[in-house]
Amino acid sequence: MDSSTAPPPAPPADPRKVEAVAIPVDGLIEAPQLPPKARAGAACKLGIDEAGRGPVLGAMTFGCCYWAVEEDADVERDQEEINDSKQLTEDQRAKLFERVLDDDRLGWAVEVVSAARLSREMLRKKAPVSLNAISFDATCRLIQRALDRNVDVVEAYVDTVGDPDVYRDRLTRHFEGRISFTVAKKADALYKCTGAASICAKVIRDESLRRWVFEERGLDDRDFGSGYPSDPACVAWLRRNAHAVFGFPALARFSWQPAKQRLKDVDAVDDDTRAHFAFVAEVEFDEVGGPARPRCTSAWRGAGAGAMVSVRTGARGQRRGEHDEDHGVGHGLEEEGTRARAEEAEARPLLPAARNAVVARRVVRVTLAPLKK
């Protein structure tokens, strides 16, 4: 095409709009610049809240928002509409989040904890991690990230997980008493900085679900509703997408009870599956890099050694692949099936342009056994 007739380039996205925020599948996003007062060393207050504790689909997000204590009265006056995000409509939350983006006095960050990471942590065979522990760790990481950026956090207001006094004491000990913590139930409705954090977390959670790109080949079932197990659309999605061999797509939290129950319902391998899968392979591997996504079967609902994966068979029940002349058994798992791969872990992808991160794995041993009938 002649350059004279080429269409003009699209204007850059407005960085103050939700659509311009690059959201990772798993990881941290934050304001690129610190507020001027924070950069100058002013004492700051910080709020933290989470979103997505209840859904069975999608990520859980942890938000923080902070500003200089000396600007507190002005910020609270100018941002008086900020409230508990659960009391606001989706449109109201998006507009308030964009006001946070547009206010140079405010700093913010959100940690996205993917469904895969939640499943991996909570379904460990050894030392499983509770959801409350995941929440505590994310809270500490957000505060530490602000400190590492030289934000002088002197006050922190946190929505409680469990008993407020116990949680406050634990946070105080973790930061060796250098921060004054206020921990309360419904803190997002009591303190503006926590309310702002709640809005950041909720908007990013909803937007990440809206932008989700399925990495599973041929799957584009987006009729999952809100992702909450009380949502009929979500229940129907779980029913449609539970596989007796491979479990759920990576969007699902395998560690949530509705997902576990649905997999129990399809645990019996049907005749159609038996016609295509004649062996199971017990694969033991070491994880080389970041959090693993649970590519699992009905026998394996989380990351770790001993995962059960199916091997598609060819004629007379032999695995497709390179054949051993002495034993008549293949040496490779078919490309179209699930196989344990040793890959270098790449940088966290962003939604929606890239796929979910794949952890590098080193296979230790693969053992075949007939599928029981």
Image: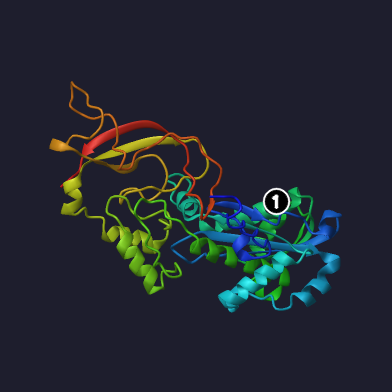
Left or right of residue 218, residue 197 in this image: right
Q: Position of residue 93 (x, y in %)?
A: 61, 73
Q: Residue 21's quadrant in the figure? A: bottom right
Q: Nearer the viewer, residue 317 or 266?
A: 317
Q: For the image shown, how many numbered marks are present on the structure?
A: 1
Going 56% across and 50% down the picture, which residue do you hit?
2
Mark 1 residue type:
Arg
* Residue furthest top as drawn: 326
- Does residue 111 appear in the picture of this structure? yes
**Residue, disc 1:** 145
Measured along the vertical axis of the image, is residue 306 above or below residue 83? above
Q: Secondary structure at mark 1?
A: helix
- Does residue 161 appear in the picture of this structure? no
Measured along the vertical axis of the image, is residue 48 above or below residue 278? below
Q: Residues within 10 Å of mark 1 (few under 14, many from 20)?
A: some
Left or right of residue 184, residue 74 in this image: right
Q: Position of residue 365 (x, y in %)?
A: 35, 31
Measured along the vertical axis of the image, is residue 99 above or below residue 340? below
Q: Position of residue 111 (x, y in %)?
A: 60, 56
Going 73% across and 53% down the picture, which residue do you hit?
146
Q: Position of residue 24 (x, y in %)?
A: 56, 53
Left or right of residue 255, residue 83 in this image: right
